[in-house]
């Protein structure tokens, strides 16, 4: 029996049809990786499964009593709790059982030695032992260590944490809860390679089922035994790893194209026969052929073209003198998260900042550009620097504005035609360009932010995890654009494969 059955799923945003009459099932033990281009509907599918989005048509049926855990990286949580207190909240039902058991034992110690009370307390004791209650602290330590939270300190209040740290805490609690089904949307976005490796091993060994949306295909190859591919308004499930899926898809695609081509030739031949003979001696035969055509189940043409963005950052003149000096810098909000930071960057250098996620790299960048004040020390750009900044948070002043409106607001001198052209160049389709920004996928929103960055000349690019939501085509295009940019680049990234080969200097803020 399937844990989940999806039948006849159809959904669209405005004129943008995501899926048409698609079906899908999730069985026990299946580890499904969800793939597709930016904007194909991966995150929307997860939201449909959780009931956050109601589809236009179709049925989503979960088996009764199946527990579902959804990774919402932006969920509201009590800021006054410490990390440990929040993680322990994953076991509230067990702590409640312990409390009731202790109450029963207290009653009995007061002289009320009722056999019924004794049996009830023993039952609670048994349930706690079988649920692993007395290993809770060990389990918390294992997960917290695996995702890098021990380095932060479990006594750290939630209010004092960065966005990346907060996302890891939410993921940790979800893993500790061990629901029957996990729904994870880009779980590696805030993890560095060591923590991704731990999560890969953890999920691969999990008996429970899960859906994972990810653009990290090396990660998917390790954890998924099924692939759900969203393409051409269809949801197709493949058995095997991501690598096996790619091989199967290539063969199936080639076979489909051959069949489609053969059918098109036959249709054209038949239509030509009907046109020539509909009014002649063979009109009866022509009408018979027309009936055959009307009954024919026509194959749809595959959307051959993949949207391949092309980013280009216009450059301002510069020299190879010192562009940025950082001396004994301390950064943070209520207290320093990074202290005594020292480095300098010369004009034209390509520099990447590394360190485990949550250590304060984003906070450092925000301090450098003046969004938040330094808590100590100093940082100074040279007078010739004009900086462009990409912020990883997908936050917009008004989520109802379309990409066209957002770009036009930022650059009012541009006519609509040019706005559309710039968005298209950055991989934002015409349909998505007219859709509310808040309804777009993370990848599509990131492309809009990159589009804004390509419209103002600069000589110093500062980018905070720009690849978090991008598909492989967009990542490659961005990598090429940054390597060709003759100005200075300061990059925060957890993807070694992205920055390897074109950056000249690595600053590890852990050291």
Image (tube, grey):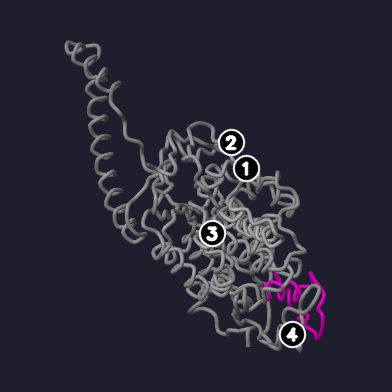
- Of callouts 2 and 4, the N-terminal one: 2
For discs 3 and 2, the disc positioned in front in the rendered view? 3
Q: Earlier in the sequence, mark 3 or mark 2?
A: 2
How far apart marks 3 and 1 lie (CA) works out to 22 Å
Q: Which of 325 and 59 lies nearest the eye of the viewer?
A: 59
The residue tagged 3 is: 186
Image marks 4 and 1: residues in contact by CB distance under 8 Å: no
Residue for point 46% across, 67% down: 202
Looking at the image, is 338 positioned above or below residue 392?
below
Instruction: Inspect the magenta stretch and tell me whether residue 377 lies in it.
Output: yes
Pointer 2: what residue?
14
Q: Is residue 146 above or below residue 339?
A: above
Q: Quadrant of the C terminus?
A: bottom right
The residues tagged by marks 4 and 3 sit, at their Cα atoms, a distance apart of: 30 Å
Q: Circle 2: is it few (<14), some (14-19), or many (20+) Cα within 10 Å?
A: few
SS of the residue under disc 3: loop
Residue tagged 4: 339
Does the residue at mark 4 contact the one at mark 3 (Cβ under 8 Å)? no
Left or right, residue 57 beside residue 421: left
- The answer to whether residue 248 is seen in the rendering is yes
Q: Which mark identifies residue 435?
A: 1
Q: Relative to the observer, which residue lies in front, 101 or 45? A: 101
2 and 1 marks in contact (CB < 8 Å):
yes
- Rendering quarter of residue 170: bottom right
**Rounded to the nearest whole Å, what is the CA distance between mark 4 and mark 1?**
43 Å
Residue 115 on image: x %, y %:
58, 53
Q: Which residues make up the magenta segment?
A: 360-388
Q: Is residue 358 above or below residue 4?
A: below
Q: Nearer the viewer, mark 2 or mark 4?
A: 4
Image quadrant where one finds the N terminus:
top left
- Labelled disc at residue 401: none
């Amino acid at each position: 029996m399937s844990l989940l059955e999806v039948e006849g799923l159809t959904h669209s945003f405005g004129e943008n049809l995501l899926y048409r009459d698609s079906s899908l099932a999730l069985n026990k033990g299946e580890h499904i990786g969800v793939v597709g281009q930016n904007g194909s509907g991966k995150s929307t599918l997860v939201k449909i499964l959780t009931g956050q989005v109601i589809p236009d048509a179709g049925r989503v049926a979960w088996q009764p009593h199946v527990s579902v855990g959804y990774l919402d990286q932006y969920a509201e949580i009590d800021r006054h709790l410490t990390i440990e207190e929040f993680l322990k909240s994953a076991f509230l039902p067990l702590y409640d059982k312990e409390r009731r058991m202790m109450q029963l034992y207290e009653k009995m110690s007061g002289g009320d030695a009722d056999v019924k009370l004794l049996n009830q307390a023993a039952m609670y004791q048994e349930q706690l032992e079988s649920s692993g209650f007395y290993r809770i602290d060990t389990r918390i330590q294992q997960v917290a260590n695996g995702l890098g939270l021990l380095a932060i300190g479990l006594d750290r209040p939630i209010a004092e944490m960065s966005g990346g740290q907060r996302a890891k805490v939410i993921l940790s609690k979800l893993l500790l809860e061990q629901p029957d089904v996990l729904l994870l949307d880009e779980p590696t976005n805030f993890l560095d390679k060591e923590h991704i490796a731990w999560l890969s091993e953890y999920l691969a060994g999990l008996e429970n089922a899960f859906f994972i949306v990810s653009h990290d295909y090396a990660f998917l190859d390790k954890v998924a035994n099924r692939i759900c591919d969203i393409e051409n308004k269809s949801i197709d499930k493949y058995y095997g790893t991501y690598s096996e899926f790619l091989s199967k898809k290539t063969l199936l695609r080639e076979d489909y194209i051959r069949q489609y081509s053969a059918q098109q030739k036959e249709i054209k031949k038949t239509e030509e026969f009907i046109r020539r003979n509909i009014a002649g001696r063979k009109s009866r035969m022509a009408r018979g052929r027309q009936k055959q055509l009307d009954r024919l189940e026509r194959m749809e043409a595959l959307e051959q073209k993949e949207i391949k963005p092309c980013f280009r950052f216009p450059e301002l003149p510069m020299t190879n003198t010192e562009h940025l000096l950082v001396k004994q810098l301390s950064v943070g909000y209520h207290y320093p998260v990074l202290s005594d930071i020292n480095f300098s960057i010369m004009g034209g250098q390509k520099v990447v900042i590394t360190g485990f996620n949550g250590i304060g790299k984003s906070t450092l960048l925000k301090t450098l550009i003046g969004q938040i004040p330094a808590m100590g020390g100093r940082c100074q750009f040279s007078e010739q620097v004009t900086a462009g900044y990409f912020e990883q948070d997908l936050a917009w002043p008004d989520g109802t504005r379309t990409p066209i409106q957002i770009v036009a607001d930022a650059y009012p001198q541009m006519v609509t035609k040019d706005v559309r052209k710039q968005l298209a160049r950055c991989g934002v389709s015409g349909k998505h360009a007219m859709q509310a920004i808040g309804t777009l996928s993370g990848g599509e929103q990131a492309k809009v932010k990159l589009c804004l960055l390509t419209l103002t000349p600069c000589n110093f690019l500062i980018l905070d995890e720009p690849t978090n939501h991008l598909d492989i085509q967009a990542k490659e295009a961005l990598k090429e654009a940054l390597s060709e940019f003759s100005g200075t680049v300061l990059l925060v990234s957890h993807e070694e494969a992205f920055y390897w080969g074109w950056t000249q200097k690595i600053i590890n803020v852990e050291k």
